[in-house]
Image (tube, rainbow, N blue to C red):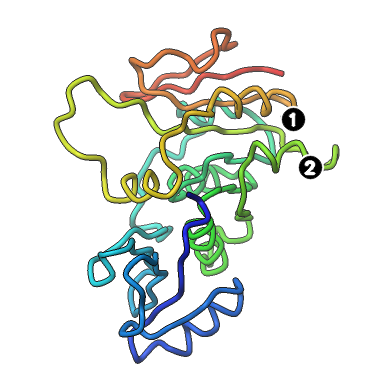
Amino acid sequence: MGTAPFVVAATEDFHGVADSLAARHDLPVRPMEQLHGNEWILYVSDRVLQLRPPGQHDQPGGAVDWRPSRFRGNLSRRQPLARACGRCSHVWDATAGWGQDTFLLAQLGYQVTAAERATAIAVLLSEAAAASETLGGQINAVSGDSRELLPALALGARPDVVYIDPMFPPKRKRSALPKKEIQLLQQLVGHDTDSADLLAIAREVSQQRVVVKRPLSAPALAADPTVSYSGKLVRYDVYYV
C-alpha cells in the first residue's frame, strides 16, 4: 500500500511549482480537472504542500509542517525523549510518518535520517527538509522500509540510535477516530503488524541503542527493555545493543 498511485496536481497559479516538484521526484503531474478518482495527489497551492486521498481531492489533506510556530514542546535534554536517545550524533527515525518526532529530534540537536515507507509521505518529508531554513541541514529524508534499508547500510554509516514509533494499539473503547494524518497513514501502509520484526533488525544494526515509543499502558514491544523514560502520555523503552 506504500506504493499507492499518486500524482502532483496544482491550482492554475502554481503549475510551474508543481512541474518542478514532479521533476524532482520523477512523478506525473496533471491539472486538477484531469485527475482520476482513484489517485492520491500531492496538492500544490499557496499553503503547505498536502497529500489528499482518492475521493477527497477538494478537501484539506495531510501535511508535513515544520514551522517553529507549530511546536512549543520541551527542548530540554532532561525531557524523556532526549534522555532515551542519550548523547549521540545520528538518530535513524525508522517510522517517520508525518515527521513530528523527526522535527523534535532535530530541534534537540541530533542529525536525523527520517525513513518512511509510504512513498508519498516520504516526498513530503523530503520537501519539508529542503524548505526548512533552520533544521533542513539536520534532516535527511529517505523513502523505503527500514527493515530493508537498515541492514543495507555500510558499517560506518550505521546510526547511533534507531528510533521506532509504531502506530499505537487501538484502545478498547474508541471514543473518536484518529486524527486525519493517522487515518491517511493507515490507508497507505495499514497497521503496524511488523514492529517486532523492525525492532529485532534495529537491535542488530544500531551502534548504541534502540528507542521505542509506547503508550503508558501498552506492553513493551519486546520483553527486555534496558530502561524506560516516561512522560505524561507516552514512555520510551530503551534497548541497549
Tally of numbered tags: 2
Q: Where is residue 78 in the image (x, y as percent from the top left)?
A: 49, 27
Dots 2, 1 in contact, CB < 8 A: yes
Kind of residue indicated by mark 2: Leu
Give the spatial CA distance, label 2 vs label 1: 8 Å
Q: How crowded is mark 2: few (under 14 residues within 10 Å), some or many (20 or more)?
A: few
- Residue placed at 37% from the left, 16% from the top? 218
Q: In the rendering, at what x and y percent does residue 11 appear? A: 33, 85
Residue 173: quadrant of the picture: top left
Classify residue 20 as left or right of residue 39. right
89 relative to 79, above or below: below
In the depicted structure, whether residue 143 falls above or below residue 51: above
Residue shown at the point (65%, 36%) measured from the top left = 147
Q: Mark 2 points at which residue?
A: 153
The label shown at residue 205 is 1
- Amino acid type indicated by mark 1: Val
Q: Quadrant of residue 27?
A: bottom right
For the point 79% across and 42% down, the residue is 153
What percent of the width, then of the height, locates residue 112? 62, 46
Front position in the image: 120 or 127: 120
